[in-house]
Image (cartoon, rainbow, N blue to C red):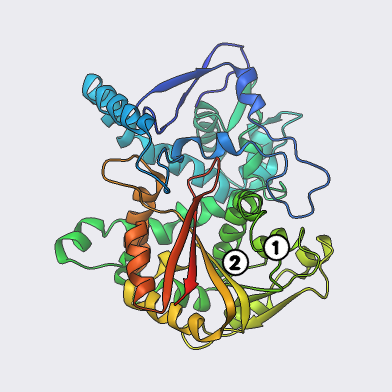
Amino acid sequence: MRDHASGTEATISMTETSSPATRRTYSPADLEQMNVNLSGGDPYGGLCGLDQSFIWRPFKSSINHHTHPLEQADSNKETTRMTTEQQPIPAIMDLVTGQWRSQVLQAGVALGIYDALSASQSSAATAVAAQIGVDEALLYRLMRASAGIGLLVEEEGARFRLSGTGQFLSADHPQTLRDMVLLNIGPELYAAWAHLPALIRDGEHDGFRREFGHIVFDHAREHPAFAEVVQGAMTCLSTMEAEAVRATLDRRHAAQELFCDVGGGHGYLLAALLRDRPQAKGIVFELPEVAVAGDAGITAKAGLVGRISRQGGDMFEAVPEADIYLMKHVLHDWNDDECRQILRVIRKSVREGGRLLIVEWVVPGPNEPHFATLVDIHMLCASSGRERTRAEFEAIGADSGWHVTNVWDVPQTPLAIVEFDPV
């Protein structure tokens, strides 16, 4: 993405369902419009006012989980094949240099560039260098590259300001993606990805364990700074996803009284779901250290004090009794045997008439472009887990006392909600 103060057109490489290798053009004014005007009435730091169609546009599934794939999906696949076949070298080079853009992004966030700038007034690169304590000449080159991919706007005299996109990398932005960047492009997961060829050769999972000698969650326990980044990244996801999930479930499960969000982090999703259910209460069930450090401010801002509680424990051993269980981006961290154990534990505690709602990136049919197929490889490198198809969810559910009754796409996102009823 390129953003120039001169008014010339900018270019952004955007992988879309319809045409992964297509390059699109935007003017600087268009790029600035990507900035979000937040709704002042949203206490969750959620998706109110957020153009999700832009955020998730590269990854939206074109399949319909309730029927056969839409005819449009066939058209999208054909367009993808044609584009790649007609322009193979640019398509491959765009993939090769993608890691360069990612590393420019990560370095800027890690050094604090986006916290030292504003969108309304430019600052000299020399001043930013003095503020964050780095080399002036090298910082200018990094900032220039950051402007070249649309994260900053460069002005005359080596001055820079945040672009509309770059604002989301500032730590104090209500919908900051800072920790998402620090986790997923940071040194720990970057090192885990380096093991991908060896993992596939050896038929193993978890490059993180291979690199550090333990799983990612144990690493977080031993390294508080890393744990903070992990929780911050999970909050980033909830900030993007909670309202969309709430809207999808808005017409369902309204009469249920007690929700339990297993692995619910700081409680963004649960707060969003309880907002329109005045009779409902909820439990955020997390690791003990996460439960203790939970953000009570979310509950207070949402007006849910007394309706949301936090409990610590081990989901492999026991969970609180509830009517509706939620798990968002939890099962994909674990292999099938581990997932069966989690599902059996929940099955023992679910109340009569209750159910389980899994929010994940569900893998579509063969040759369907979808974000889930990329996340699946990320999970291979970072954990013992995987992304799953509907059939794979049905299989682990059937072995654990559950039956899949519905799979709903979450509009304008690549997410799906898998609904299980107890057998």
Relative placement, left or right, of 391 versus 6 is left
Q: Which residue is mark 1?
A: 254
In the drawing, what numbered circle is on residue 221? none
Relative placement, left or right, of 28 versus 421 is right
Q: Is residue 269 above or below residue 294?
A: above
In the drawing, what numbered circle is on residue 228? 2
Tell me the element at label 2: helix
Real-space CA distance between mark 2 and mark 1, rounded to the nearest whole angstrom: 34 Å
User: Mark 2 or mark 1, which has the lower sequence index?
Assistant: 2
Amino acid, disc 1: Ala
Amino acid, disc 2: Glu
Q: Is residue 253 above or below residue 71?
A: below
Coordinates of residue 231 in the picture (x, y in percent): 59, 65
Query: Residue at (55%, 69%) from the top-left corner?
Result: 227
Coordinates of residue 375 in the picture (x, y in percent): 39, 53
Relative placement, left or right, of 39 versus 338 is right
